[in-house]
Image (spheres, grey):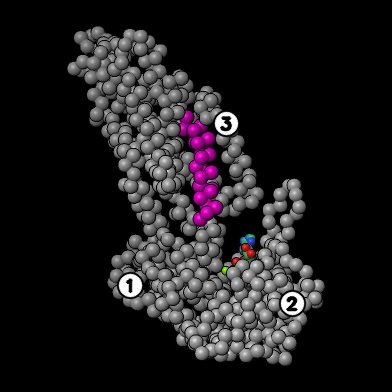
Amino acid sequence: MEQMIEEQKGKDSELYIILKNSWSNFFNFFKEDRFAMVGLIIYLFVGIIAIFAPVIAPYDPHEMLRYDGEYRTNAGPNSENILGTTNMGRDVFSQLIYGARPAVLVGVSAAFMVVLIGTLVGLVAGYYRGKVDTFLMRVTDVAFGIPFEPFVIVLVAFLGPSIWNIVLAMGLLLWRDTARVIRSQVLVVRERGFVESARVAGASNFRIIFRHITPNILPLALLYGSLAMGWAILTEAAISFLGFGDPSAVSWGFMLNDAFVSQALSRGSYSWFVPPGICIMLVVMAGFYIGRGSEKILYPRMNQY
Amino acid sequence: MGQSDFLIEVEDLKKWFYPKQSLIGRRKAPLRAVDGISFSIKKGTSIGIAGESGCGKTTTGKLLLKLYDATEGSFKFDGVEMNSGMTKQELKDFRRKAQLMFQNPYEALNPRYTIYQSLQEPLIIHKYGTKEVRRKKIINMLEKVRLTPVESYLHKFPHQLSGGQLQRVVLARSLVVDPLFLVADEPVSMLDVSVRAGVLNLMREVTSTMGLTTVYISHDLSLIKYLCEETVIMYLGSIVEKGPTDKILFSPMHPYTMALISAVPSSDPDVELKELNINNSITSADNIPDGCKFQDRCPYAQEICFKQEPLLQKTKNDHFVACHFSEEIGGKQYENRLCSTRSYG
Ligand SMILES: Nc1ncnc2c1ncn2[C@@H]1O[C@H](COP(=O)(O)OP(=O)(O)O)[C@@H](O)[C@H]1O
Ligand SMILES: [Mg+2]
């Protein structure tokens, strides 16, 4: 018996088990819902493309391509440029591949901020209740009152157009949904027997919040993080399309903007602006599918209607 | 260690819940869940609290564990007053000495903790020994509650165990820090009848070998008879009768106690049924009338009962009862009925 306990030694750290269980819950959810699975696959696919962009893309996305000393501008699909070139002679396919990078960067970091801020606010408000709760929920209401995209545009215009400022601006607002949902979940979990039993055992508030309540709301927080990812990518695209984005980052929104201002539409260069549009649509759909799956699981009776 | 013979001394303890007041309309009356109770528990003995659902038993238990702050009154633990002025360290000391066993074993353990982790938590909180010492202690405790072979339970999760096994884990968890005092709130009411006796026997054995002072909360009088030296009968937040268990159960003096006893089904068909039926309407704790709280359900109620609240008084039978007419109506022998009720043991 002693030996068997020894074997478990490395694995019995509380944190290890908590993390392991939250992750397995999170993935079980994707296994159960086919739409959510599709969403997850899209996210993973975009992630892989972002990581291997330099290997996949045939050209540098900024390089103005010359063939026989001539710039090749506004070319249609051909053997060297499968999606053609831009009006400045850049390879559209390479831009599309590199465009996954800002998308992933924006999506992941916005999701991280949303999960972190939203979960903390929700935990503190739901656990302490009373005045703390009232205060935090009023702050959340204010965040809900601010229109999202104009806020991001104004803040980015103010701080300077870099991708990190866009992420920051989104993080400052997008936590509001997560905070509300987590708070209501915490209000339920904190009344459960094991929380009281931890209190009787002498556990501090800190311990109860992070060791007992957090593991039970973490799957929900991760889910809201996945949703925020789609939102953040769409917002970055919108901001870039409107011309407020980071000029040095080739994002899908930037490509659309580039195509728009150089009148690609009237020239009928569909191979330039349709692919980035589809990419944006796919990641937003991924977020929607995951959200749809979560509703099915959180409210199982919805299937009946 | 205090000098007192008593581990728990409670004096006129009250817990009122104040409902949220709406801005307009009549002020809502507070809900008097526990409304001035007094009793004490000798070290190493056990006491039973009985009464129908909603009479304030759980609230009393939580007051004794400082899970609620009392609205009013005094609560001494081991001779020390447990008021709101106690420091964090004092409260933590108290948390080691006083433990709770829940009614619902399915809820009492964190579903994401293994049994080992659940038992280890109180030890970590109270900085008990090294990791090695803690492990020995946990294994020892699980053996004590007869969850053997221990290694097959250590790394299981709560949903993998049955109710009876879970309640043993809950018992082990509350006793692993060597407490002095244990409140068991309806410890077996959620379990299958077939495993109740096993869990109760185990509790009786373990608490007596550890010299614990215990409070058993139950609406099941045969459980209390089996486990407790003293009994307190509560009705709508007040004590209506208290004293040694045999006296209370064999010659009750309060009509409510009589009604509770006559509601216990008898297993012996020859026992003469001495029914005492009471009115089934239940007064709620936020709308308590003047006079005796039991007035509207009592078959013996007279004029005085509607005007004056009876105080808890010592009877010639050596226990305490709160009824104006206890001398006239009390003292009937109910012995036969509960003697034949041998559910446990
Ligand atoms: N946290 C609370 N807030 C408001 N009312 C409560 C609370 N806890 C218990 N009560 C009320 O106090 C009364 C006594 O409850 P309780 O002590 O749980 O009774 P018992 O355990 O004897 O069934 C009930 O009327 C109940 O509704
Ligand atoms: Mg109760």
**Nearest to the observer: residue B44 or residue B13:** B13
- Work out whether residue A105 can be spotted: no
Which quadrant, please, contains the C terminus of chain A? Answer: top left
Residue B345 vs residue A167, the one in the foreground: B345
The residue that disc 1 covers is: B151
| Residue B19 seen anywhere in this rendered image of the structure | yes
Badge 1 density bin: few <14, some 14–19, many ≥20, Cα 10 Å = some
Instruction: Residue A173: say if magenta.
Output: yes
- Residue appearing at x 23%, y 24% in the figure: A58
Q: Residue at coordinates 56% horizontally, 88% vertically from top-left?
A: B272
Disc 2 secondary structure class: loop
From the top left corner, tell me how far across and down residue B152 is, in percent. Answer: 32, 71
* Residue found at the far left of this picture: A79
Is the residue A190 above or below the residue B294 in the image? above
Q: Is residue A194 left or right of residue B288?
A: left
Q: Are marks 1 and 2 on the same chain?
A: yes
Of residues B276 and B339, the one nearer the viewer is B276
Q: Which mark is residue A69?
A: none
The span shown in magenta is: A166-189
Instruction: Name the chief secondary structure element in magenta.
Output: helix
Which circle marks residue A146 in the picture? 3
**Picture mark count:** 3
Q: Amino acid at mark 3?
A: Ile
- Which quadrant of the figure shows ligand 2? bottom right
Q: Residues within 10 Å of mark 2 (few under 14, many from 20)?
A: some
Residue beneath the point at 68% across and 73% down? B297
Looking at the rendered structure, the kind of residue marked 2 is Ala
The image shows residue B60, relative to residue A138, as above or below, that is below
Indicate the quadrant where residue A304 lies: top left
Say which of marks 1 and 2 sits in front: 2
Determine which residue is flagged by label 2: B301
Which element carries disc 1, helix, strand or loop?
A: helix
